[in-house]
Amino acid sequence: MPLDTIDPAVQAAHNALWARFVDAYGVILDYVGLDGELSRPTPEECALCQPNGLSWGAPNENGAFFGGVYLEGMVNRCLLTGRDEDRERARRIAGGLMLLATVGERPGFIARGVADDGHSHFPIGSNDQTTPWLVGLWRYVNSGGPDAAERDRIVAQMVEVVEVLRECDWRTPCDRPPFDFRNSLAGMNFENAPRLPWVCLMMARLTGEAVWHERYETVLSAPDPNGGPTRLDICRRGMIWERPGPYCWTAANSVTALRGLWEMEDDLARKQAYAEGLRHSAELAAESLPLALQFDHDDPRPFSCNWRVANELWHEQRTVAEAVELGRRQYPRLAQESPRWSCEANNVREPLFAAWIVALCLDGELVAAHTPAIMQAVRHFQYDRLYLSHLFPAELAYYQLQRGA
């Protein structure tokens, strides 16, 4: 696909992301001022866990999450365009993800971002950082993009991370005391039900070790100790709102794992179950597409990059639970300081991630029915006027649609 045939809105989103949101380390930032305004937490603030140990509200909160998700999109862009510049940009994002896996002292820890020194970081990760980190790099090493040496380095790092997760009963480790683990990939809910089988099946394909296929079989059919459905049943049911929704932007991490399961599975019955789950997920996600049209670029509410107002509520955190509780209490203060934030989150981030979920569906008729609404959403935004980097799923959805077509 020649560059000049890419939809202009999609190319505008691509240009906006690379102009402001991809930092010198290949890590995607959460927000940047229209004039490039950016104030990262310092190494000292990272050490003190200011604003909180998860970096919630800071501009380097979701580097592993966003980089992993976006790398999947860049792989698809490279396959469509064949351009050297696109391959180099995919390599930069992969390098950023590798950095986030190596700045910590604790094996298996995936950092969310780094300070200006390129090393200092907040100590608490998440399954929402680790899963897309793995998915993005998995797509990349199987794309034909990296040379043998780069592929070997990435695969070795992926294997190390997953082995640590397994040894920790699938809990995601934090980097330093007093924090231990943030959460887990082993939950019996939609957030995690596709993720753990995907990790095991991906490792079976990546390493060729039969034990990983055995683990896949075990976790997929394991009964819920509380009497709920198996992971396979949850995958078949697809995405649901397990807390007040919609929140396609985080649920997409589970949907893309579900898509990966469908791609790797050889058993036709299971393949059909995964396809059914993708269809149900797309049907629910489609309900969020109209939110894009509610976004007003001329809304006078201001955006502020001054995340340090959250430090008005700061206190020392001795456990992960205390850090989470602090972060939640700081959000209203951040919203007061930057009221435009929620506008972009609700009416840009949510419908664009929803568009990607719909595009991941295997039901061609369903996707075709919603493609006009997807493209209407993608074309609604003036991407150079957005403060949040959450615009990048416009690319993901479009490239997925093009590859499907």
Image (cartoon, helix red, strand yellow):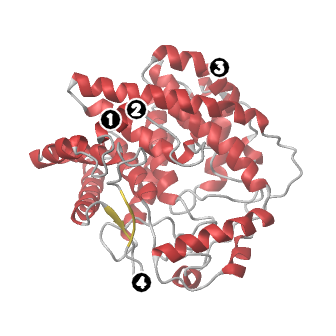
Q: Residue at x 59, y 47 (%)?
A: 244
CA distance for labels 4 and 3: 50 Å
Q: Nearer the viewer, residue 129 or 319?
A: 319
Q: Nearer the viewer, mark 2 or mark 4?
A: 2
Residue hosting label 2: 237
What's under tag 3, amino acid-wise?
Answer: Pro
What's under tag 4, amino acid-wise?
Answer: Pro
> Left or right: 241 with respect to 145?
right
Q: Nearer the viewer, residue 351 or 63?
A: 351
Residue hosting label 1: 233
Residue hosting label 3: 372
Q: Is residue 381 above or below residue 304?
A: above
Disc 2 to disc 4: CB gap under 8 Å? no
CA distance for labels 4 and 1: 37 Å
Q: Nearer the viewer, mark 2 or mark 3?
A: 2
> Left or right: 307 with respect to 186?
right
Badge 4 element? loop
What's under tag 2, amino acid-wise?
Answer: Arg
Q: Is residue 70 visible?
A: no
* Label 2 vs 3, first from the N-terminus: 2
Q: Is residue 261 visible?
A: yes
What's under tag 1, amino acid-wise?
Answer: Asp
Q: Is residue 176 above or below residue 14?
A: below
Residue 300 screen position, x and y as percent: 89, 51
Residue hosting label 4: 178
Report which quarter residue 174 is drawn in.
Answer: bottom left
Badge 2 element? helix
CA distance for labels 2 and 3: 26 Å
Q: Nearer the viewer, residue 36 or 297?
A: 297
Disc 1 to disc 2: CB gap under 8 Å? yes
Looking at the image, the residue that sits furthest to the left is: 210
